Amino acid sequence: MVQAYTRLKIGDFILPFNPNLVQVEVRKKIIRHKIPGRDGDIIQLLGQDTKEITFSGVFVRDADVNNVKLLKEFEKKTPLDLVFPLKINQLSNPTKVVVESVTLSARDGEYDMNSYTVKCLEWRPVEVKQNMVTLLNFKAKDNMQAALRQGGYV
């Protein structure tokens, strides 16, 4: 069972304040083929791209401590759980993500206040089916044998 959080959680870090902005971008992979002498294009749909999740906000108190905690999550080499509060839930909860970038910024004269932007990609492990691996192995073996028959080098 997923624990309900009132604040956004990424990895082991629960943000002290919810982000001001959460964006989830979903795109399709589309190829447009232009055919000379034909009106319009031929469109080929290749599936859905990985979801991009961006959130930004401000650390008001203990900004330095929160910056360090956020950067520690960024440095992890494994996918992280991203858990949204129920009021901004736009994805399945939790969502596995890989943090692509973290931007921290501060202005002169604004002490103990930093803004942050975190850009994540939804993590979906690649599922390779055994049949596909076997097919690729046969193709590679056939190509190698054909090259050797023709006196070519592999």
Image (cartoon, rainbow, N blue to C red):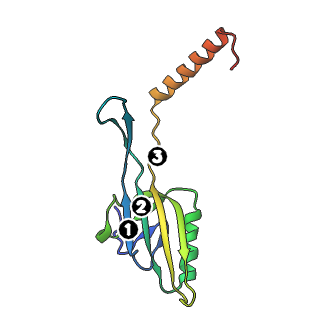
Residue linked to disc 1: 22
Q: Which mark is residue 1?
A: none
Query: Residue 111, relative to residue 37: is it above or below?
Result: below
Q: Which mark is first along the chain, 3 or 2?
A: 2
Please rate how many residues cluster around mark 1, counting C-alpha atoms within 10 Å: few if below 14, some from 14 to 19, many from 20.
some
Q: Are marks 2 and 1 in contact (CB under 8 Å)?
A: yes
Q: Position of residue 54 (x, y in %)?
A: 43, 64
Marks 2 and 1, how far apart at CA: 7 Å
Q: Which mark is first along the chain, 3 or 1?
A: 1
Q: Which of the two residues, 99 or 128, is positioned nearer the viewer here?
A: 99
Query: Residue 100, relative to residue 126: is it above or below?
Result: below
Q: Position of residue 125 (x, y in %)?
A: 46, 46
Kind of residue indicated by mark 3:
Pro
Q: Position of residue 89 (x, y in %)?
A: 31, 65
Q: Which of the two residues, 8 or 19, is positioned nearer the viewer here?
A: 19
Badge 1 marks a residue whose secondary structure is strand
Residue linked to disc 2: 53
Residue linked to disc 3: 125
Kind of residue indicated by mark 2:
Ile
